[in-house]
Image (spheres, rainbow, N blue to C red):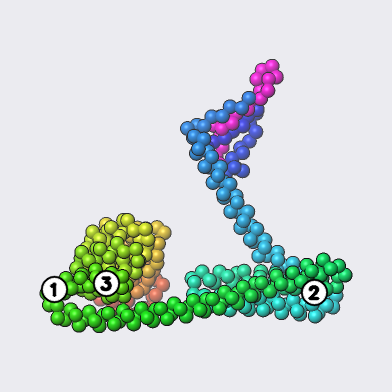
Amino acid sequence: MRVSIRVEGRDFGELGAWLGQGLSPDGWGGIRIRRRSGGAPFVVRRRHDGVDAETQSKGRSSSDRDLARIVARLLVLVILIALPIAYLAWLGALAIKHRGREVSVSLLACAITIAVGAWAILQSRASTAGIGFIFLPILGCAAGGLVLAYLASRRAQSGIVRTVGLAALVAAAVPAVAALRGGRASIARNQSRDADQVRRDSAYARHRVRLDTVLAGSGDRAADTLEALAREHAADRELVLAVLERPEAPATLLDTFAHSPDLGIALQAIRNPNAQPETLERIYRTHQYRDYFLQALAAHANTPPAILREIRALRPAPITGLDIWFAGNRSTPTDVLLDVARTSESIDAVRTLLQHPALDCGMIEGVARGPALRAHADDADVAERLATLRATKCR
């Protein structure tokens, strides 16, 4: 939306720079204020220039949210910097006054808080747990400062001040105690998950052996046997996974379990070479978490070429490392392979591409001039393979 304010013919500037919107210095796209002849009061006229009030409201709300985010980030930055500086200044002042015992006790509390917090973070297996290290110095300084406040309160005569000092001492222990409890909870949770995973792995291996025995006597009815087992024991996750990996699994069974809300089961279903193009396309087009399946789709020989092209064109790339799966898929369209040859930074992807049955001279030259080979110019195997291919395919 464009806004200009004019009073008695004078343009009062462009307010949109502050509002985060564009302005029109020569138009009346927003609010127009003028004085009627005879000294009448100011009259406000609003024009929307095709922008309805709801759109304007949304624009203002968006600007308000952006401003709130900026303010929040600045506050976090101030806390991250100001609190440690204030704490160190306090320690310095006490050191000048030769109150070494207070400084030592405070630093000990700070160190304990940071150490316990770091230990608790290391117990977690969450991918984002490391972010906690950013806040450890703040917690340590806070704990050390609260200890200083307690020690200072001991010199006061007022009972209220002493009570507040005790409260500060209790507060100083909160971060370390919370981190200790969190770390112990993480250990217990990890142990439980590890035990559960061992149980699942054991059951999975047992079901695989069982299926080998059952299918050995099934003959031509192997597909029917697998389908009957999977449908009868659909609640047994490990058995279903073992069934879905079998090369005898029918396409109808794979399509059924590709609908599963269990992402692991759905992924196992579409990884099977018997999964049909329709099943793979539906996963890509309709699944809520399609990024989870991109690697399997890029590697599957039955993935429709149009889907492979779309995955390759996704920007920014939802996940990394897809180049090697495109390069190893015999059904990957040649234009996608050429793009991998020219742009991939993965020497492993290039090495795989040079084994592709559809490799042509254009791809070979793309690899020779591409970023992967420039970054790994000392890779003798790839260089030798390129020289051989150039001699045979680029004559």
Question: Label for residue 221?
Answer: 1
Residue 344 belongs to magenta span: no
Quarter of the view holding residue 46: top right
Q: Residue at x 86, y 70 (%)?
A: 156
In primary-sequence order, the first of circles 1 and 3 is 1
Name the main secondary structure of what is drawn in magenta. loop
Three-letter code, disc 3: His
Give the magenta-colored segment's residue range: 21-42
Three-letter code, disc 2: Leu
How many angstroms separate mark 2 from mark 1 (CA)?
81 Å
Closer-to-camera residue (233/338): 233
Q: Residue 67: percent from the left, percent from the top? A: 60, 50
How many angstroms separate mark 1 from mark 3 (CA)?
18 Å
Disc 2, SS: helix
Residue 82's place in the image compared with 57, above or below, is below
Question: Label for residue 151?
Answer: 2
In primary-sequence order, the first of circles 2 and 3 is 2
Three-letter code, disc 1: Arg
Q: Residue at x 24, y 70 (%)?
A: 232
- Give the residue number, with chain letter if any, for mark 3: 233
| Count of numbered circles on the image | 3
Residue 34 belongs to magenta span: yes
State which mark lies toward you, 1 or 3.
3
Q: Residue at x 63, y 61 (%)?
A: 76
